[in-house]
Amino acid sequence: MIRQAIGNRWMLALGVVSVVALLGGYAALSHHQHQINPDDRTIPTWSQLKDGFVKIVGVNARSDERWLVVDAKATGKRLFLGLLCGVGGAMVLGMMMGCLAPVEAVLHPPLAMLAKLPPTAMLAVFFVLVGTDTNMYVAMIAFGVLPSLAQSVYLAVKDVPDEFLYKAYTLGASHIEVVWNVVFRQVMPRLIDSIRLQLGPAMVYLIAAEMVVGDVGFGYRIRLQSKLLNMDVVYPYLVILAVFGFSMDYALLKLQRKICPWCSYDK
C-alpha cells in the first residue's frame, strides 16, 4: 500500500545498510583505481583519507593554524549571519504579503521574479555593490534565500483557514493579536520546514563565493587543495560539510517539535 509505514527497527536497519553500501562502494572503487595506478590521488584509500583528516585537524607547520578551526569559524559565521538576515527579512515580508493585500500587490511580483534568479550568477554584482568582505557573503546568502522563504511564508499565511480568523475576531481579538496568536502560530512550522530546505542552497551560495574570492573558509580550502590534487583533504572537508548540514537539519526538526507542539503531521 502506498505510504504504508514500517517499523522503526526496519527504518534504522535499512538506513544503516544504505550507508554501509555507500562506504563499501567507495572502498571497492578506490581499491580498483589503486590496482590500476598505485600512486593515484583522485580516489584516496582509507589510510590516505585518515592522513588527510590528521592534516586538517593538526597544526599546520607553515601557518601555525588548524585548518578546520579557522575555516569552520569563517564559514560558520558567514552562513549564520546570512541565514539570520534572510530568514528575518523573509518572515516580515511574507507575513505582510499574506496579511495585507496592498503589500501583496506591490511585493509579490518582484519577489517571484527574484526567486528565479540564481545568486551565483550575480557574483560580479555583489562584488561591485558590497565588496569582497564578510558583508558580501552575508548579502549573497540573504538574497539567495529571502525571496523563496518569503513566498513560503506568504503561502502559509494564505493557507490559514478563514474560520480561525473569524473565531478570533468573534472572541474580541485585535488585528495584532490575530496575526501573532493565530496566523504566526500556523506559519511557524512551515517556516522551519522551508528553512530546512534552504540550508543546502545557502551552503552552495557560500561555498561558491568562497571558492572565487575567499582567503579562508571551506570553499577556499577545497579550491586550493583540489588544485594541488590533495583529494585526501578535499573529501574529508566534503564529509564535514555534509555532517554539518545534516546536524543543522536535525536541530531544526527538534526545534520545530519543541516550539510547535500543535504541529500535527509526523516527520
Image (cartoon, helix red, strand yellow):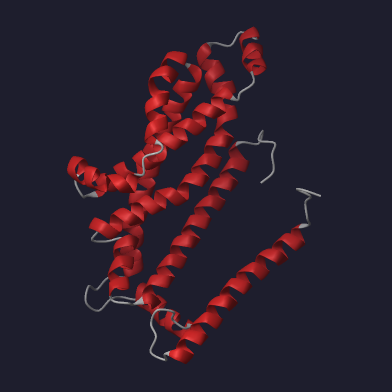
Report which quarter residue 125 is drawn in.
Answer: top left
Residue 213 locus on image (x, y percent): 23, 56
Q: Position of residue 91 (x, y in %)?
A: 45, 30
Q: Residue at point 35% right, 77% down?
A: 55
- Residue situated in front as seen by the camera: 51 or 107: 107
- Residue 235: give x, y in percent of width and height: 42, 71
- Residue 17: % across, % down: 67, 70
Q: Count numbered badges in the picture.
A: 0
On the image, which quarter does residue 71 sit in? bottom left
Above or below 46: residue 203? above
Residue in the image at 25% along x and 79% along y:
61
Of residues 231 and 250, the one drawn nearer to the viewer in this rendering: 231
Residue appearing at x 36%, y 73% in the figure: 56
Most foreground residue, 24 or 66: 24
**Furthest-right residue in this view:** 1
**For the point 54% across and 81% down, which residue is it?**
27
**In the displayed structure image, the side of residue 224 where residue 264 appears, left or right:** right
Horizontal relation, residue 93 to residue 260: left or right: left
Q: Is residue 246 above or below residue 100?
A: below
